[in-house]
Amino acid sequence: MLARDDTRPQGAPRAAVIRRISTKFLLAVLAAVVLPFLALALFVETQMAGRLSKDVVLYSLKSLAADLAVRVDRDIEEFNSNTALLAADPGSYLAIDEALREGRGELDGEVEDMRRLMRDTQVQQFDNWVLAKRDYDLLMLVSSHGRCVVSNTVGRSGLGLSEELLADLQARDCSQEIWFEAARNGQPFRVDQHRSELLPPRYPGVAHPENFHIAFSAPVYWPADDAQPERSGQFLGALFVLVNWARIQDEVESPVLKNYFQGLVGPDEFPSAYGWIWAADADTILAHRDPSLYGESVSTSPRIRLPQMSAAARESDWGLYPEYEFAGRRKNAAFKHTHAVTEEGFGWIVGVGIDNDDIFEGVRELRAQLFQVTALVLLVSVLWTMLVARRTTAPVLELREQVLKVAGGDLAAHNAVRGRDELGELGRELNRMTDEIRDSREKLVRAEKEAAWREMARQVAHDIKNPLTPIQVSAELCKRAHDEKSPEFERIFERTIEITLRQVAHLREVAGDFHALTGVRKGALVRVDVGAMLAEVLELYRALALERGVEIEAQLQGAPVLADTAALRRVLQNLVSNAFEAMPAAGRLEVRVACEAGAACILLKDSGEGLSAEAQTRLFEPYFTTRSKGTGLGLATARRVLEDLGGSIELRNSEPGPGVVVQLRLPLVESV
């Protein structure tokens, strides 16, 4: 870190602080921007008090959608509970049982009055229930034969049902109805919004909520009875309940929705918020403030065509719809799924929306005033900033010139420091930094030279190591043959001497090549038979193969190429050495040389463990190795040598089977 150079004399007048550029800009901002905008913020806060931002409105829409879903789920739970309660009422199973006994002729005249009283009592109970709840159009008990036993005789309005309608109910066979089949199987059932065939429409010819219903059913059983244990749990029939859709429609038209956003509009205006309900398919409208939309498709209906809303409702259980346009107005809305069928619901999607005009009405009222005040503030700010900038630009430009000179390599560049403000301090620090960069560059050059020598030393060590391996193995084999007095000792001794002399000569070539890297000389390119050279390299490792139990299969075709003999031999020897490293105990090495499409193709395939994912991506990076020994320069050097000769190298895992495949290509040279 550069030390701070504060040359202000001790005891200097504190008034000098006023000359600092930070103080100048602070005063400028306070005078030209901050104070006017503080007044503007106070003005806006006063005018917008009690109004909601768009984010708050969107959050409120989600809350209202969740609340609406809760109310609808609560309604459905109430209908489910009431249906189950009525089905379990003693009057229900007694009424059905008496009807079944009457149908079998088991009742005599003495109990006729009792049967009639029981039936009348159940009818009265149903009538009282309809009048008290005001949501039910029909309560009907059906026997196990599917025939109506008892139903209410009055409607929600208090008027009696017609004799003709009651007669039709008595004559109707319900045994094939899906809800009856569910009851026969011991399951309650719910029927989604529909136009019921059991009752005539209240408003014929028009789309009206009271023309629609949802239905609930529950099985009726003979209860546990110690006196008649054989009848306990006997299926007697079903209770069918028809609920008028107006109850659900009232939920989506609840005044709560409009009153919630009353603060967005004027006192004499009404917000546009309203709710709706879609079927479980997230595409069919079931409830809306416009009943003519009942049954319309959200995604395909010509009146709507909002497939993005259906998609949003299918993708999430609760959230916001994308902003959309309906009936010529831009809107925002939220949705929430109600309980699914598996949760004793219908899986409806409820929505709550509001016009964007309502959201931004308060902002529109202030927009003109905001534009005027903002324009004035900007004008003053620009004029004042131009005046201040003119006084501060000159030293900044001088610093820029110095930076450009330093970037161009002139580390002797300095600026004449003037002033005691931040720019003056910056100039002094820049001069000091330039001096440090100059010193650091000299140190870096020395470090790079040392790193280059270290890398060369690693490379020398790597290339010297490979010839030493066959020398050591051959010497150990010769010593063992001598100690064991092997009859093959003479032949092994001669081959050991031959290999040793050859590798010593190779070491001399390595030393010469590294001498050439200094720029004194470069290797000459000569015509080389790759097949013959690879055969020589394999012969060097023959003893190591016998010791480790590695089987070598070679198919070597003559392939003349133009190459530096020593460099190419080192590449091939390094690759063969790598293959043996991958097979420390037994294995198979396949080596092939062939001529294809004007190139010599060399392939080496071992049966080792193969390459990891990391190794495959970093094989040719200098100093990267997967072995505990080695510098990691072998493959990097091999690729450089081959690319200099116009060739290539590729390593990959063998498929199928374990191991690594190495493939080299070198351009063939025409025969001389």
Image (cartoon, rainbow, N blue to C red):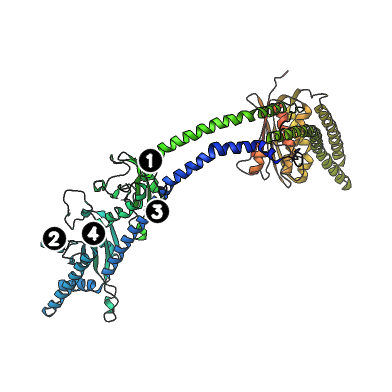
Q: Is residue 535 visible?
A: no
Horizontal arrangement in the rendering, residue 510 relative to residue 429 (left or right): right
Mark 2 vs mark 1: give the one in front: 1
Image coords of residue 154 (percent x, y): 16, 64
Quarter that holds the N terminus: top right
Q: Amino acid at mark 2?
A: Leu
Tell me the distance, in whole angstroms, between the alpha carbons under discs 2 and 4.
19 Å
Q: Is residue 669 above or below residue 451?
A: above
N-terminal of the pair, mark 2 or mark 4, is 2
Q: Which residue is label 2 attached to?
A: 165
N-terminal of the pair, mark 1 or mark 3, is 3
N-terminal of the pair, mark 3 or mark 4, is 3
N-terminal of the pair, mark 2 or mark 3, is 3
Dot 3 and dot 4 residues touching (CB under 8 Å): no
Q: Residues within 10 Å of mark 4 (few under 14, many from 20)?
A: few
Q: Residues within 10 Å of mark 2 (few under 14, many from 20)?
A: some
* Residue at (17% x, 55% y) in the render: 202
Q: Which residue is label 3 attached to?
A: 63
Q: Amino acid at mark 3?
A: Ser
Mark 2 vs mark 3: give the one in front: 3
Tell me the distance, in whole angstroms, between the alpha carbons under discs 3 and 4.
39 Å
Q: Which residue is label 1 attached to?
A: 365
Tell me the distance, in whole angstroms, between the alpha carbons under discs 1 and 4.
60 Å
* Residue at (86% x, 45% y) in the render: 481
Q: Nearer the viewer, residue 464 or 43?
A: 43
Q: Is residue 612 above or below residue 179?
A: above
N-terminal of the pair, mark 1 or mark 4, is 4
Q: Which mark is residue 177?
A: 4
Secondary structure of the residue carrying numbered label 1: helix
